[in-house]
Amino acid sequence: MSKAVIVGGGAAGMMAAVIAAEKGHRVTLMEKNEKLGKKLFITGKGRCNITNDCEKEALFNSVVSNPKFMYSAFNAFSNKDTISFFETLGLRTKTERGMRVFPASDKSSDVIKVLEKRIRSLGAEVLLNTSVTDILIKDGVCTGVKTGDGEIFADKVIIATGGKSYPLTGSTGDGYIFAKKAGHKVTEIRPGLAPLKIKEDYPARMQGLSLRNVSVSFFDKDNKKIYEDFGELLFTHFGVSGPVILSGESILVKKLAKEEMRLTIDFKPALDEKKLDARLIRELEESPKRRFKSVLGALLPASAVPVFIDILKTDPQKRSCEISVKTRKDTVKLLKNFSLTVTGTGGFDEAIITQGGVDIKEIDPKTMESKLCKNLFFIGEVLDVDALTGGFNLQTAWSGACVCAKNI
Ligand SMILES: Cc1cc2nc3c(=O)[nH]c(=O)nc-3n(C[C@H](O)[C@H](O)[C@H](O)COP(=O)(O)OP(=O)(O)OC[C@H]3O[C@@H](n4cnc5c(N)ncnc54)[C@H](O)[C@@H]3O)c2cc1C
C-alpha cells in the first residue's frame, strides 16, 4: 500500500483521508491551520449544507463549469452516497427546501467532528499547523512535499488546498502555485457566488434586511430578461446577496463583466398590481388620518420605509386622505418593480467559491491524477469546477475526493 500525503484538511482533503485510509493506504493529512475544516465550519451559515438530495440529472446540471469532468466522480460517489456515508459515521441528516441536506443537529461542527474522528480512528496521521510550501518533482514524478520542517517523501501527493475565496479560512490559492510548478495551466480565477454590487445607496440603507419571499428579475442593457427567481434576498452594505441572488450569480457573472444590469425586486409577488392597489386603497381608507409612512409600514419592513418615501418623493407626514392617486399608483409600481443597477460582483473576501482553477483538460477525471506529473493529484475547489448553491459545491469536493482516494 502507498504512502499518501494529502495537502489541505478541508472538505476534499478530509474525505480523501478517510477513503484512502479505509483502503489501507498510509495517510498523512497536512493542514496549515490549527484545526481541520475551518471553511466547512462556516458553510451553510454554520449549518453546512452537505449535499443536495436531487436526482442524478439535476446533480449534473448543477455543475456550472466543466460538468462532464464530474461524470466519473459522481458515478463513483453520488449525492445519495454522501448521505449514507455521513449517516454511517453517525451523523443524522435532514432534507430541507430545495432538497438541501443538512446535519439534523444544524451544526457544521458535527460534520467536521465525524470526519476527524473517522480519520483518527483509521490511524491516519494529522499534522496541524503544517503549511506545505512546495511539491517535490523528479523526472516528471511527484515524490513528496516540502514544509517548514523539511522534505517529506510520499508515493502519492494529493493537493486539496481549495480555491481563493474567504482566504481567512486558509484557502489562499497555494494549490495553483503547486500546479504551475508541475506544468499545469491554471485558468483565470474569479470570485464566484459573491454578493452583487449595486450603484444606488438603497441596499446600504436597508443593510441587514432579509426579505423572505420576493421575486427578482435581471435585465441586460437591451432590457432582455436574463434571469429570474423567487426566494430570500438580503441587503448588504454595498449590494444584495442571499439565496435568490447567489443561485443566479453564476449565470450573471459573465454578462456583468461586460455591462451593468438592472435588477428588479417584486416585494409583493403574491399580489398582482390590481390586487395590491386594492389592498393599498383599503389601508388608506381604513384610517384617513394615518400618516403615509405608517401606511407603508403596514406593507413593508421598517428599514425599507424611508427608502420608499425618498424614491416616491412624498412627505412621510402626509395623511392617508391627502395621498394622490398618482402617489398611490407609483407606490404600487415601486412595490412590484423596485429597480436597482447592478455594477458587478464582490471580491474573494466574500465569495462563496472560486471560479476557474487547475485546467481539467490536464487531469484524469477517473483518478484526479495529473496527466503531466505522475503521482500528483488535484481534488476539490482547486480545480476548474464549480457548481450552484444548494450543497452542490461540497458534493463536487466529496465526489472528487472519493474517486481519487479509491484509485490511488
Ligand atoms: C461562507 C461559505 C459558505 C459555504 N456554504 C456551502 C454550503 O453550505 N454547501 C456547499 O456545498 N458549499 C458551501 N460552500 C463552498 C464550500 O465550502 C467549498 O466549495 C469547499 O469547502 C471546498 O472544499 P476544498 O476541500 O476544496 O477546500 P477548503 O474547504 O477550502 O479546504 C482547503 C484546506 O486546505 C488548507 N490549505 C491551503 N493551502 C495549504 C497549504 N499550503 N498547506 C496546508 N494546508 C493548506 C486550507 O487551510 C483549508 O483548510 C461555502 C463556502 C463559503 C465560503
Image: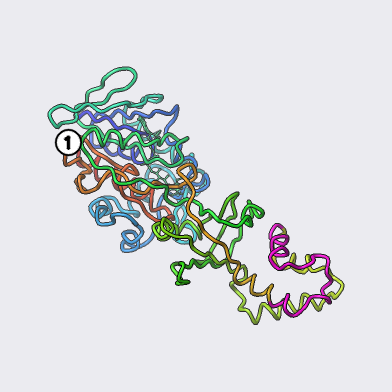
Specify the quadrant that holds the N terminus. Answer: top left
Instruction: Check if residue 323 falls in the magenta segment.
Output: yes
Q: Which residues are magenta?
A: 303-329
Q: Residue furthest left?
A: 139
The residue sitting at the top extreme is 149
Q: Is residue 13 above or below residue 47?
A: above
Quadrant of the frame with the C terminus: top left
Residue at 54% from the left image edge and 61% from the top image edge: 341
Q: Residue 179 location, x and y as percent? A: 26, 36
Residue 237 coordinates in the image, percent (x, y): 60, 49
Please say if 329 is above or below 188.
below
Q: Quadrant of ligand 1?
A: top left
Quadrant housing residue 337: bottom right
| SS majority, magenta | helix
SS label for mark 1: loop
Query: Which residue is at a point 45% across and 50% down the rendered structure image?
Result: 49
Q: Is residue 115 left or right of residue 342?
A: left
Q: Is residue 235 left or right of residue 392?
A: right
Name which residue lies at 43% across and 68% down: 226
Position in image of residue 223 (x %, y %): 48, 71
**Between 109 and 172, which is closer to the camera in this rendering?**
172
Q: Is residue 344 magenta?
A: no
The quadrant holding residue 156 is: top left
Instruction: Judge by depth and name the residue closer to the eye, 160 or 304.
Output: 304
> Residue 123: x and y, percent?
31, 28
Question: Which residue carries the number 1 mark?
Answer: 373
Q: Is residue 210 above or below residue 123?
A: below
Please name the amino acid that badge 1 sits on: Cys
Side of 323 where 142 appears, left or right: left
